[in-house]
Amino acid sequence: MDAFEGIHSVRISPSPPPPTSSGRAYEVLKAGRSGIAVYSSAVFFGTPSEAEEKGCVVGRLVDLDPEPDPRLEGRGQVGPTLDIDHEVQSRVRSTSLEMREKEIREKGSEILSEQLDAAKKELKLKDKECERLSQVRIQLEQELEELTASLFEEAHKMVREANVKQAGAEKQLKEAQGKIDVLQAEVTVLKSLVLTSTPSAPNRQLHPQLQLPIGGNNRNKSMSGGFPSPPGKPDPPSLPVQPVVKEDREMDSVLYAEFLMWKEHPSLDRSSALMSRIYREDIGPCLSFTRSELSQLVQSAVENNSLTIEPVAMSALPIVKASAIECGGPKKCALSGVSRQCRHRIKLGDKGNYYYISPSSRARITAVCNFFTYIRYIQQGLVRHNAEQMFWEVMRLRREMSVAKLGFFLTEQS
């Protein structure tokens, strides 16, 4: 066999030897430089026609690793043996690729089916959750509708009750205002009757026994019949008839015009002509005391409606200390500084000292407070009188301030 070393292909016989019992498709004839030489047979290549189609003649010795042909170098051409090897390798490779592709497809389909099942389960859970949330939403909407209906019903009920209470309160207010007007009129009449009755000129309406019939004889007869004189004494002389004095009044046109202008926009502001005049002519002089600083504080408290006047219990009068002389005492007025019996005291605001005041100072402060109270009633719309009646009431309150400023006041006698 060493003599054939280096031979690439050799024809030994025109026909291939018979196949061995082992059924091999080729016979090894020689070990070459880098491979083996194969003797082709019909078992490996099939029939001669099929072998010829494949480019291999049956019975020809084929070198699986032939020496490169110098004529073919540089041309990039491969012999028929390499074509067969490449075809075999391509077949094997395509088969393996198909099997691997099949495996990949099967694995991919399994993974996708698992993911699809998981997605279906997740969708079912989501559907159940959505259904539960929709039921909760429906329930909440029903509860909200019921709550809204109940709230509206309760609100309407409260509004109806408030309207009924308001109507009742307005009715009671009207009745109370009517009673107040009647009482004020009665008080005004009684005050006029009391003020016009003096010992020198008694009011005959308060003393009906003084209303005697006209005529001397009849008067003597009634007197003698009513009060018989004892025997031996002459009849008392008849009293002269006193004329009845009636207070009359006449409206000042300038003051009334100022009042009408103020009544359009009632306020305590001094910018209006009426309030400026009243502050200048009545309030200022009435609250002008010896202690000017305390007088200003009293006026501010009266304007702010924060002044308090209360009686002093005479049985338990406090002892005034030296540090509280400015507050006065039971026998000294804190405003005027005059030694008088002080039965009342005032307090400016909620926090502060008490100041003892004399009856004259109390009358002056009370007159100013009454005026401010009536002005506030007009400002709040609580007075139902016409303009003329309100004007005369304001003038009466101004007269009280003037009288109190001049030192006249009424005292209570036990």
Image (spheres, rainbow, N blue to C red):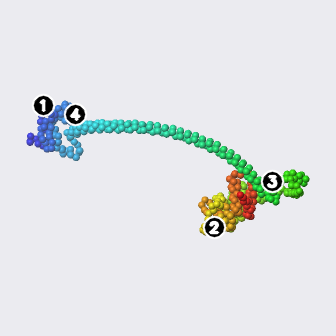
Within 10 Å of disc 4 (Cα), the crowding (few <14, some 14-19, many 20+) is few
Please, what secondary structure does the residue beneath circle 1 have?
loop
- Badge 2 is on which residue? 326
User: For the point 14% across and 44% down, which residue is it?
Assistant: 33
Viewer-nearest of discs 1 and 4: 1
Residue type indicated by callout 4: Glu
**In which quarter of the view is residue 341 placed?**
bottom right
Within 10 Å of disc 1 (Cα), the crowding (few <14, some 14-19, many 20+) is few
Vertical relation: 6 (above or below) 275 = above
Q: Is residue 146 left or right of residue 380?
A: left
* Residue 21: mark in rendering: 1
- Badge 3 is on which residue? 207
Residue type indicated by callout 1: Ser
Mark 2 touching mark 1, by CB under 8 A?
A: no
Residue type indicated by callout 3: His
Viewer-nearest of discs 2 and 3: 3
**In which quarter of the view is residue 393 placed?**
bottom right
